[in-house]
Image: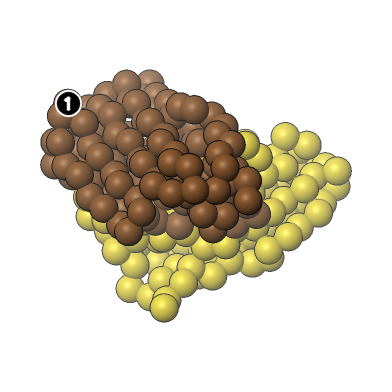
Amino acid sequence: GQQVMQIPQYQHVQEGEDFTTYCNSSTTLSNIQWYKQRPGGHPVFLIQLVKSGEVKKQKRLTFQFGEAKKNSSLHITATQTTDVGTYFCAGPPQTGANNLFFGTGTRLTVIP
Amino acid sequence: EAEVAQSPRYKITEKSQAVAFWCDPISGHATLYWYRQILGQGPELLVQFQDESVVDDSQLPKDRFSAERLKGVDSTLKIQPAELGDSAMYLCASSPGGTGNTIYFGEGSWLTVV
């Protein structure tokens, strides 16, 4: 079955340092979505990438979709304490599906 | 901003008891999902509705779990009997429907089975 792995599983950074999480799917994805879940909270949609090689930016966050549409990355520049949480990538389990299969997540801790 | 409403937020129940969760999706959203999230893991789909019809319930443990969306609006997820391993957060989500639509999650219902 489909697998979506994220690395690292955990990351501790000093405030101001950069952070990157990588997402790798066992299958080609028609699109990939990223969600952020604060401790004790629920997943909140961040962005969707659709095109091969696509790069999107949201302030200090940069999202990239791989050329083969099997991997993606999220990079945060100059982390802040508000960035704390778990970041999940997610994609449709098969082409045409409108549900999401979530990755294993990367839990980010920012040390002030 | 429209939100997915869920209740209760927290539920503690004894094993072998019945428990139910309710969800009201964003108005106009045809697709409704129930996900289960075990602490430290990503959400896993339990059941997906398109209007009142079940689209995917392949991961729903049907011997003890049931879900319905009778009028194609709000939905109920029931567990009977609850087992210790059911302790998790149950997330309801909705989307307008169609491929590639964003999925919006509710705040979740935390279940502890003792």
Residue A60: image x %, image y %?
36, 54
* Residue projecting furthest to the bottom: B1
Residue that numbered label 1 is attached to: A68
Does residue A53 appear to the left or right of B89 in the view shown? left
Is residue B68 visible in the rendered image? The answer is: no
Kindly state the secondary structure of the residue where label 1 is placed. Answer: loop
Residue B114 in the image, given as x and y percentages of width and height:
86, 43
The N terminus of chain B, quarter of image = bottom left
Residue at 49% across, 36% down: A105
Which of these two is toward me, A17 or B13? A17
Chain assigned yellow: B
Quadrant assignment, res A51: top left
Q: Quadrant of residue B38?
A: top right
Which chain appears brown?
A: A
Amino acid at dot 1: Ala
Going by the image, does A42 lie left or right of A6?
A: right
The residue lying toward the viewer, choosing from B19 and A47, is A47
Crowd tier of the residue under label 1, counting other residues whose Cα lies within 10 Å: few below 14, some 14–19, many 20 or above: few
Q: Nearer the viewer, residue A31 or B83?
A: A31
Q: Is residue B2 visible?
A: yes
Q: Residue at x 26, y 53 (%)?
A: A57
Q: Is residue B77 left or right of residue A27?
A: right
What subunit carries mark 1? A
Residue B18: image location, x then y, percent: 75, 51
Relative to A42, does residue A96 appear above or below in the rendering?
A: above
